[in-house]
Image: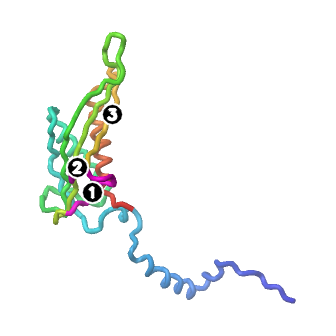
Amino acid sequence: MIRRKPQSYLSWFGNPLIALVAVVVIMPGCAAYQFGSASMFRAGIRTVHVPVVRNDTFRHDLGIRLTEALVKEIERRTPYKVTGDPNADSVLTCRVVNEAKRVLTETETDDPRALDAVIAVEATWAGRSGQLLMQNSVVPNGSLAITFGQDARFVPEAGQSIDSATQAAIEDLAERIVSQMECRW
């Protein structure tokens, strides 16, 4: 009795003809899939218009600072191009609805030791035809906008200020809002 050496699966693909047939058979099944970071974003959207964020608080600079952070984050993380044209493929509209400073801990003389800077924003991302592109995974509350809240801690005794904490909260908000522009799995 002659014993044959078992063939491995890799030896099948040593033949170029078999490898070509395998690729031709497998590839049509993958035609609808996108690979890489492009699969995380909507295919029909190339441009985004970001109007200046409306600010309903007494801190007049929050809207402008959030607009700048959103534009930078969209340009950095997405394939979308931010444009000043209101007729872009989509429009990201945001509104700062609340800004607060919360005292977390105090000294014995009631001086604030640690505080939180808190910002709340409503955001809506819609296509040119009006369809909502950013959808909340939670049950909607009747509003078309998604509310984002962000806080940042600061300690005045350590030389930190409300402005640096607010800027950190704005950058975190921009990151979270742009993350919601990704397609759901």
Q: Is residue 71 visible?
A: no
Q: Residue at x 82, y 85 (%)?
A: 3
Q: Secondary structure at mark 3?
A: strand
Which badge, 2 or 3, comes first in the chain's sequence? 2
The one of 137 and 30 positioned closer to us in this rendering: 137
- Secondary structure beneath dot 1 equals loop
Magenta region, residue range: 131-144
Q: Kindly identify which residue carries mark 2.
A: 123
Callout 1 amino acid? Met
Residue 1, located in which quarter of the rendered image? bottom right
Q: Is the residue under label 1 in contact with that under label 2 (CB below 8 Å)?
A: yes
Q: Main secondary structure of the magenta part?
A: loop
* In front: label 2 or label 3: 2
Residue 110, position in %: x, y? 31, 13
Q: Residues within 10 Å of mark 2 (few under 14, many from 20)?
A: some
Q: Amino acid at mark 2?
A: Ala
Viewer can see residue 102? yes
Looking at the image, residue 183 sits to the left or right of residue 130; the answer is right
Q: On residue 134, which mark appears? A: 1
Which mark sits nearer the N-terminus, 1 or 3?
1
Question: In the image, residue 27 lies at what x, y percent?
Answer: 46, 80
Badge 3 amino acid? Ala
